[in-house]
């Protein structure tokens, strides 16, 4: 496997050999001084070029970096300018996410607190402060954000319940693992951030949350994950609601917001009743 110096040498050699590329930056976890370091970290690299489209029209340049396992190419728009990114995994385990941005994005670079300048051919890159993850910390939620997240957890629980009763597993898993999970992650992240003066970055999808939570809260959060067994899903759902109540009441007091305890109690009672219904029930009674 290529080491970090070898990969950066390849990237810079590639950029210096192409006149249209005028600057190169690094972002992502390798630019984050607080991120855990390991050999599987991606190289998140951006080339600023006068002709981004050329790298899509002729992708033969990819082979200069090594032998492929798989790649994905995506288009994106940033600051109303179109760019392209290649997510590339190589046979030796190196992954490079290489973006090609138009030069017009250069003035906006200071907006990303995790940016390291690797190459600046024309001294066009604006002054950038030392890299940090300050732009990725979890802020205090507004009252609207708080209310919506907690309501989403309890509201969508009824969808999980009726999906289980109907034996609609894909629907159940989507409602729980996509809709409720997203809202629960917000609440748990806010709780973690509140314990660290609103100065933490829990990482994408909360991947570093364990670092910032008390052990018992982390274990309860872990228990909100389940497989395809309905009894297990019921258990994880009630665990999620119990966790929401436990940390939600504390967090609401801290924020000066209201915790919807009546919604909580009524919803849990409703769910317990649905769980008790036989598969051939013809009414809710």
Image (spheres, helix red, strand yellow):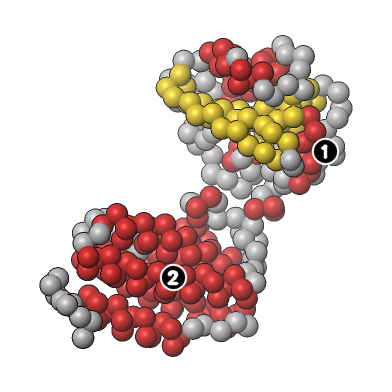
Q: Is residue 52 depicted above or below 145 in this figure?
A: above
Q: Position of residue 26 (x, y in %)?
A: 67, 33
Q: Which mark is residue 107?
A: 1
- Callout 2 environment at 10 Å: few (<14), some (14 to 19), or many (20+)? many
- Callout 1 environment at 10 Å: few (<14), some (14 to 19), or many (20+)? few
Q: Which mark is residue 153?
A: 2
The answer to whether residue 242 of the structure is visible from this angle is yes
| Residue ranking furthest to the bottom | 262
Q: Earlier in the sequence, mark 2 or mark 1?
A: 1
Q: Taking 205 as reference, is 145 left or right?
A: right
Q: Name the residue nearer the viewer: 67 or 146.
A: 146
Q: Residue at x 56, y 80 (%)?
A: 252
Q: Name the residue nearer the viewer: 140 or 215.
A: 140
Q: Position of residue 89 (x, y in %)?
A: 47, 26
Q: Taking 264 as reference, is 35 left or right?
A: right
Q: Which mark is residue 4?
A: none
Q: Taking 154 as reference, is 100 left or right?
A: right
Q: Residue at x 20, y 80 (%)?
A: 283
Q: Is residue 179 depicted above or below 95 in this figure?
A: below
**Do the residues under discs 2 and 1 have CB atoms within 8 angstroms?**
no
The secondary element bearing badge 2 is classed as helix
């Amino acid at each position: 496997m290529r080491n970090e110096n070898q990969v950066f040498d390849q990237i810079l050699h590639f950029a210096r050999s192409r006149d249209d590329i005028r600057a190169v930056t690094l972002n992502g976890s390798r630019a984050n001084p607080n991120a855990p370091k390991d050999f599987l970290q991606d190289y998140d690299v951006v080339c600023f070029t006068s002709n981004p489209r050329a790298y899509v029209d002729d992708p033969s340049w990819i082979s200069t970096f090594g032998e492929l396992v798989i790649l994905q190419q995506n288009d994106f728009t940033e600051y109303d300018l179109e760019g392209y990114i290649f997510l590339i995994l190589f046979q030796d385990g190196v992954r490079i996410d290489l973006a090609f941005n138009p030069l017009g994005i250069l003035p906006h670079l200071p907006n990303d607190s995790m940016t390291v300048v690797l190459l600046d051919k024309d001294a066009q890159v604006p002054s950038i402060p030392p890299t940090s993850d300050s732009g990725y910390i979890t802020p205090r939620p507004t009252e609207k954000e708080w209310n919506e997240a907690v309501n989403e957890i309890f509201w969508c629980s009824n969808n999980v319940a009726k999906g289980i009763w109907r034996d609609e597993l894909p629907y159940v898993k989507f409602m729980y693992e996509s809709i409720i999970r997203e809202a629960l992650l917000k609440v748990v992240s806010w709780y973690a951030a509140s314990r660290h003066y609103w100065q933490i970055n829990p990482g994408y999808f909360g991947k570093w949350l364990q670092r910032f939570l008390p052990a018992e809260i982390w274990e309860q959060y872990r228990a909100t994950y389940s497989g395809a067994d309905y009894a297990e899903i019921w258990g994880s759902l009630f665990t999620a609601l119990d966790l929401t109540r436990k940390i939600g009441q504390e967090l609401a007091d801290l924020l000066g917001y209201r915790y919807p305890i009546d919604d909580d109690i009524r919803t849990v009672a409703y769910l317990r009743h649905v769980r008790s219904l036989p598969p051939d029930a013809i009414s809710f009674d």
